[in-house]
Image: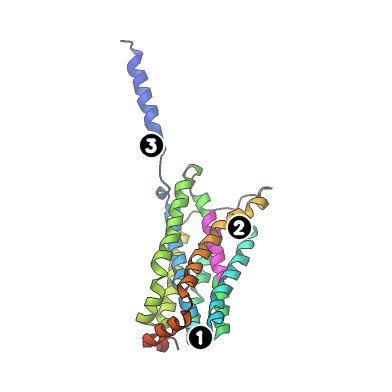
Amino acid sequence: MDKSCPHAYQELVRVSEEPRVKDTTALQHRSFRLLLVATVGGFAGYVLLLPVVPLWAVTGGAGEIAAGATNAVFMLVTVLTQLGMPWLLKRIDHRIAFASGTMLIGLPTPLYALSSDLWLLLGVSGLRGVGFGLLTVTGAALVAELVPAAQHGRAAGLYGLSVGLPNVLFLPAGVWLTQQIGFGPLFWIAGALPVAATAAVLGMSRVRAKPAQRSGASAFPLALLPSWIVMSIPAAGSRRAGGPSRADGLRRIHDAGPVGSRTAR
């Protein structure tokens, strides 16, 4: 047997095993794990109140259209904020933008409990919409920055899971919690979740803005598409769930939960 054969065999084994060593997952990156935690907390604060704020408006005497305007204002301000995100992310650390988003979603939320007056609800929803616009665009941008390019596919899937789980768990829980603990405590809980998630952002690696590319303008609408989808799906689901008898259903929920009407007033 040729003396070089064992050496050739060892080289073949080494080469065949190298891809397995390098085939790491996105979860091995600490900053990316923290991003997932912060995303769950931020989206939980948003989704939890998606059906609750219109219900709170109805208890204050608002009609269906006026109650739905609370979510409409939230989404309008979110989209307007997203339009300015490419300009903002060129100038500040992505972590600052993300943390500002979670704080703006959470800190104004307890103000809902002050009154069910429609103008107050619209103002608070607008502030939270700014935060959600910051959260959605910056979160997607951080996925691309915190993991190597070879892991972007898996990282995007995990990030999508961190966005989807709050929608599955907290969207139906909002109205149920309103009946159990009342509006006031629920507003505080929904505000505390995103604020607590901000702590995870502090442990993430610094992400510096990259020089703008000439092709960025044409890619801009596609970059925002996932964020628009994220907002539209739960909102559409809540509208379908309302149906023709939505107003009656909201009033029945309010009448069935005496704690809710007393706690926040």
Q: Which residue, given by chain and number where applicable, does mark 2 sit on?
A: 89
Tell us which disc is closer to us: 3 or 1. Answer: 1
Query: Where is residue 149 shown, x and y percent of the image?
Result: 51, 43
**Residue 69 lies in magenta, yes or no?**
no
On the image, which quarter does residue 184 sit in?
bottom left
Is residue 206 at least partly visible in the picture?
no
Q: Which residues are magenta?
A: 129-141
Q: Amino acid at mark 1?
A: Ser
Dominant SS type (magenta): helix
Q: Is residue 26 above or below residue 37?
A: above
**SS at mark 1?**
loop
Instruction: Give the class, few, some or many, for how many residues have Cα within 10 Å of label 2's Cα (few <14, many ≥20).
Output: many
In the rendered structure, the answer to whether residue 215 lies left or right of residue 27 reads right
Q: Which residue, given by chain and number where applicable, does mark 1 sit on?
A: 116
Q: Which residue, given by chain and number where applicable, does mark 3 sit on?
A: 21
Q: Is residue 48 above or below residue 66?
A: above
Cβ atoms at labels 2 and 1 below 8 Å apart: no
